Amino acid sequence: MTRTPPAELTVGQVAARSGVAVSALHFYEEKGLISSRRTSGNQRRYPRETLRRVAAIRVAQRVGIPLRMVKEAFATLPDGRTPDREDWARLSAAWCDELDTRIEQLTRLRNSLADCIGCGCLSLDRCLLRNRDDRLGEQGSGPRRLFTRAVREEEDRANLRIH
Ligand code: FES
């Protein structure tokens, strides 16, 4: 005889089944990535599909997709539904550009790790050749030679928002 799984789960059950800490689930909920209803005793109850949402969030995080992008992707689903297989294929395809950017960034990081990274320290012999007088500092803060164009553009946008 098969047992029908419960349609709703407590936060502890979601944590146990998803392998995600209760505090992380609360954080996801606070960020609007998952949602629950409250019982009369003010306890959270999550629809069973939350497990798939949490899995999608974890996979996205694992490959470096920011939670902001995950939330934007979830927002494209009708009626806030949990992504099905086709949804997941579409969402993950949309993240390919982001992944390509990260791969490019990591490749540069790997290739430049022992070299001047343009951080402004001017402490390596090679800095004299590659970043004489901290010229890269004119482009902005941080290790300039490791930042991809996409990261630089994101930084520029963030700076525009701040100012
Ligand atoms: S390693 Fe810092 S400026 Fe070259």
Image: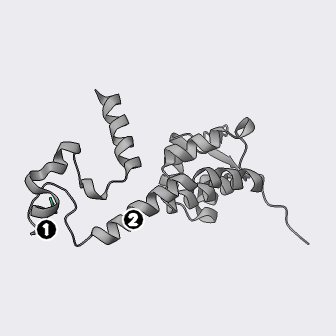
In the picture, which quadrant includes the C terminus? Answer: top left
Residue occupying the point 9% across, 60% down: 122
> Can you tell me whether the CB of the residue at mark 2 lies under 8 Å from the nearest atom of ligand 1?
no
Where is the N terminus found, in terms of image quarters? bottom right
> Residue 68: horizontal and vertical position, in percent?
50, 43
Outermost residue, front side: 129
- Residues 141 and 41: in front is 141
Which circle's residue, 1 or 2, is located before the other in the chain?
2
Q: Quadrant of residue 140?
A: top left
Q: Mark 1 vs mark 2: give the one in front.
A: 1
**What residue is shown with label 2?**
106
Q: Residue type at mark 1?
A: Arg
Residue hosting label 1: 126
The residue tagged with tag 2: helix, strand or loop?
A: helix
The answer to whether the residue bearing label 1 lies less than 8 angstroms from the nearest atom of ligand 1 is yes
Q: What element carries label 1?
A: loop
Amino acid type of the residue that numbered disc 2 sits on in the rendered structure: Leu
Splitting the image into four quadrants, where does ligand 1 fall? bottom left
Q: Can residue 21 be seen in this view?
A: no
Residue 143 spot, x, y in % from top left: 24, 55
Total number of numbered discs in the rendering: 2
Q: How is the image coloured?
A: one colour
Q: Distance between the residues labelled 1 and 2?
A: 21 Å
